[in-house]
Amino acid sequence: MSTVPSELKYVKTHEWIRDEGGGVVTVGITDHAQKLLGDLVFVELPEVGSQIQAESECAVVESVKAASDVYSPVTGEIIAVNADLADAPETINEDPYESGWLFKVQLADPEEYERLMDADAYIQLCAAENE
Amino acid sequence: MPFIPHTADDVRRMLDAVGVADLDGLFDEIPPALRAGELTGVPPGMAEMEVAGLLGARAREDANAVSFLGAGAYEHHIPAAVWQLATRGEFYSAYTPYQAEASQGTLQLVYEYQSMITALLAMDVSNASLYDGASALAEAVLMAVRANRRAKSRRVLMPATVHPAYRRVVRSICSNQGIALVELPYCTACGNVVPESLERFAGEDVAALVVPQPNFFGVIEDVDALTDWAHAHGALAVTVVNPLAASVLAPPGEWGAKGADIACGEGQPLGIPLSSGGPYFGFLCCREELVRQMPGRIVGRTVDLEGRTGYTLTLQAREQHIRRSKATSNICTNQGLMVTAATIHMALLGAEGLARAAGACHANTAALVARLCEIPGVEPLFDRPVFHERALRLPAPADEVLRSLAAHNVLGGYALGGDYPELGDAILVCATEVRTAAEIDQYAAKLGRVIAARTQARCPVPPKI
């Protein structure tokens, strides 16, 4: 069973979102997602300063099996990306919720975070997908 | 590997299994308006004897002539061993196998090809080849636009000195993908793109600059300045090069301060016969940082569980069987047989042999140009160094002159006026290492007579019949 930290928010495309305060959130992919992808070999991150739209593609994670799009869960501006992943993409497999984070976003609408799915809803979504 | 098509019985059983009445039923989801009509241009079948006769006659049209024609495809000496080996049963197939079907020998050969072409161009990575030089340039442009994430504009600067057919192919493939090709004019005195002329794009958003070397006129471009300009302005440097020229000129990976980002071109000069225009192969190389945007297949070397060396297709995660419409390209194959010949050709000649062939081409073309320019009214168009082709101005209509020469079994060159009307009666000539001094003399003598017949004042007294 995958871990789903209760303090985070989630979206149905298997990204997690952490509130960092001040309208800033950190985004990564969930433990469930990294298990489905398998060993990650490459991560393509958005440019710092670029504007992203919720539900649009903004990054690519590539495993030995497939290259998959990462969808932005929120709308705003990229203010930081996890540059350490360039040399160590396996960090996402090893620690998806902490050192395996992907990027940080300054939200266009600070209320957007509150409207995202909570951990319980995400657990139900994964359970439904497994049926 | 046998290829056994489905029998009518197989087809019937498969249709029954999926519950479809006939083959057309499989395509029901495609709206009728989008379906291709019947093939109307296909003539009725012919017997083998008739086909052999027809193709033999066509082939003879291209035979016998002494060629001073280049313009993208070049007659070079190919050691007999190249095609003797390439046509062995282990290699000889028009079909390029998928991973599961590819033998270790085939994979190793492609790996050796990639190693040689990257060494020749001083680039980090090569793919297993593409269809031809023009489609390789189109893929290089698409790749550059994908890879250059700083640029938002999808604008690519395309010099008019790039092969006109390549520019048309790039336009066909890229125009529906939102890529804007901006044509760069050339200096009519020197036949190259003047780096300072790019300054009008400074401050604008440009994704890539295409740099030909040599360019279509055979002229050596100022590749260091062009490459550095691209990098200074946030653009990628995409180069289209003659691989034989790369054996004597600075290779793309060493241009300017940082080297070219993507290098591509036509592989035909490396052991592929002219054969009326194809099949040839395209090569595509890049810097390591861009490898995940490279289309096509790449063969890697690895070890198996017992530590033995093995070869395998690698970096396939972005190909169309996995990424579908988001794939880097819809080309998941390569020109296997042509690459086999090119690899053997490069192995036989080696770096020194390629450089000597290139040097002989350069010297022969210089000798040809010197002889032709002794004819009154014939003069070089551009005042810059060339590799093995040069544009000449003629004092008579170029098309007529070339037609007269062809009647004397001389392919005299390529008329430039169609693609470059501003150049008027100009032709592009080429003498590779296979042309002899005697052939060059014969060409000069025939050209002199053809031009004299068209330029000298006619005798006012009509001939008596």
Image: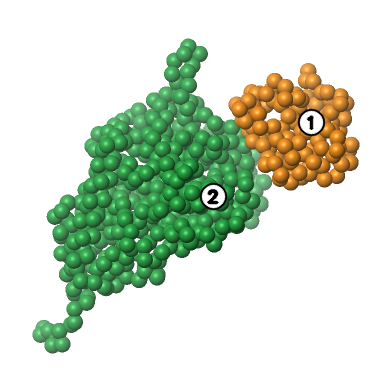
Chain colours: A orange, B green
Residue at the left extreme, as displayed: B464
Work out whether B310 lies above or below B172.
Answer: above
Q: Quadrant of residue B27?
A: top right
Q: Residue at x 52, y 50 (%)?
A: B230
Q: Is residue B458 left or right of residue B8?
A: left
Mark 1 Cα-neighbour bin, 10 Å: few <14, some 14–19, many ≥20: many
Work out whether B117 lies above or below B65.
Answer: above
Q: Residue at x 60, y 57 (%)?
A: B204
> What subunit carries mark 2?
B
Which quadrant of the rendered structure holds the N terminus of chain B? top left
Check disc 1 and give the amino acid type: Trp
Q: Is residue B4 visible?
A: no
Number of on-image labels: 2
The residue nearer to you, when weighing B122 against B462, is: B122
Across and down, in percent, residue A129 comes to 79, 28
Say which mark, if any, is on residue B415: none
Residue marked by disc 1? A16
Residues at circles 2 and 1 in contact by the CB criterion of under 8 Å? no
Residue marked by disc 2? B232
Check disc 2 and give the amino acid type: Ala
The residue nearer to you, when weighing B188 against B400, is: B188
Give the CA distance from mark 2 to mark 1: 38 Å
The residue nearer to you, when weighing B215 against B442, is: B215
